[in-house]
Amino acid sequence: MKKNILLGVCGGVAAYKSAELVRLLRREGFEVRVMMTAAATRFVGSLTFQALSGHPVATDLLDAGQESAMGHIHLARWADRILIAPATANFMARLTQGMVDDILTAVCLAARAPPVLVPAMNSAMWLNPATQANREIIESRGIRLLGPGRGELACGESGEGRMLEPEEILNRLRELSPTGPLQGRSALVTAGPTREPLDPVRFISNRSSGKMGYALAEALQAAGASVTLVSGPVSLAPPPGVERVRVETALEMYDAVFARIDQAPLDLFVACAAVADYRPAEVSAGKIKKNDANMTLSLTRNPDILTEVAALPADRRPCCVGFAAETGDIRRLGEEKLRRKGADLLAANLVGGTQGGFEDDNNALTLLWHDGQAEKRCGDAPVADLRMDLPMMPKRELAAALVSFIEEHFFACNPSS
Ligand SMILES: Cc1cc2nc3c(=O)[nH]c(=O)nc-3n(C[C@H](O)[C@H](O)[C@H](O)COP(=O)(O)O)c2cc1C
């Protein structure tokens, strides 16, 4: 499958190496478009990149001509991967701050998938606490940095800060784009708890740590899918290469999921978040005072995200996987939930015990699916069972096993085009 790479070039001496990078990427079969900062055009002419990529180079955010040709939003959507090489200290600082003062930063902010940065700078600039603080923030957002390497620098010094050679960048990109069985598939995973505010300082929430959902996002990415993670408040870093959208409440999670589905059809929806079923009917503007001995809270039902995604018309409906955290007979409750929500697969797990479930690093799952559901998606392929138990194991292993199951039962007979 041909992939679109959008290469952003910043103003550093290493910009000349990016010309060779364009040549190598095209030889590898990528479609390449280039955008340059104003400073970059002082180092290498845009004509060089135009000739090598075979496309006009985007240099100006506020140029009506360029916007009407392929504007920043269009470029962001076109790109399967955004690569910034070289990434200057200045660019890293601007990206960290969420600034949109040129075409590169505008595209990075508008894009669905996080960019990959290839830093290049003098080693003192790289090791400066300001740059290192920016690096930390950038990485905490799931943005991957390739390098920098060590060696001779353009300034005559030697040390850390050298841009990786184009061949090595290409190798690292191959590693970042696993050619797994779900390559070309898009998946959305919800994870973590939601918080339903009562007043400015209090909320109703639950014990979900987000570990299972994050592990699933990582496993889907490793299987080659492009993954969006819509996450409630948790203290986990997003897996590299996974786009994370942070939300707090169930309504925000609902909006984020449907905004993503409206952007482009999804292949797979995994509802792993522990979404609050109810929210306070009223949110007090000021802190609620303790005036009475008892207090009654009035709650309103939140929308059921999984049920609504599963009820989408066939042309917009992804394969739907739900999670059920239960404290009783998980098989009976899980089967009932599978039917009520209209999901394709339900992963039920026991919570509230001494081992597994919320907060724990381990878990066990019982997978339940509809009679005939797999045949519907996989033609004549036989269905082995309607129930499968995945025993207690680390959540990352469990996530990999679940992703293999999903791939085999719902996608193996229907490869992506
Ligand atoms: C000769 C020269 C070489 C430079 N090399 C680098 C470099 O390798 N890395 C870097 O971060 N900045 C370097 N700079 C500084 C950037 O060009 C400067 O911060 C510029 O504003 C970057 O703009 P941009 O991030 O929009 O491309 C260099 C400046 C000069 C004059």
Image: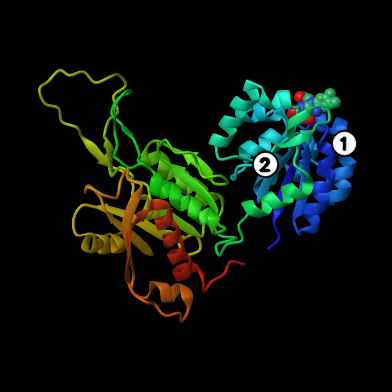
The mark lying in front, picked from 1 and 2, is 2
| First of labels 1, 2 by sequence position | 1
Image quadrant for the C terminus?
A: bottom right
Percent from the top left, x then y, of residue 38? 81, 30
The residue at 54%/53% (across/down) is: 221
Looking at this view, is 4 or 167 the one in front? Answer: 167
Looking at this view, is 338 or 72 the one in front? Answer: 338
Percent from the top left, x then y, of residue 121? 75, 30
In the image: residue 412, left or right of residue 333 = right
Q: Is mark 1 on a helix, strand or loop?
A: loop
Query: Does 258 sit above or below residue 237?
Result: below
Residue that numbered label 2 is attached to? 146
Amino acid type for the residue under numbered disc 2: Leu
Residue 114 location, quadrant? top right
Looking at this view, is 148 or 188 the one in front? Answer: 148
Q: In which quarter of the image is ligand 1?
A: top right
In the image: residue 361, left or right of residue 151 = left
Residue that numbered label 1 is attached to? 44
Residue 55 in view here: no
Percent from the top left, x then y, of residue 403? 45, 60
Q: Is mark 2 within 8 Å of ligand 1?
A: no
Bin the neighbour count of mark 1 within 10 Å (Cα to Cα): few under 14, some 14-19, many 20 and up. Answer: many
Residue 123 in view here: yes
The residue at 89%/43% (across/down) is: 48
The residue at 72%/50% (across/down) is: 5
| The disc label shown at residue 169, or none | none
Amino acid type for the residue under numbered disc 1: Val
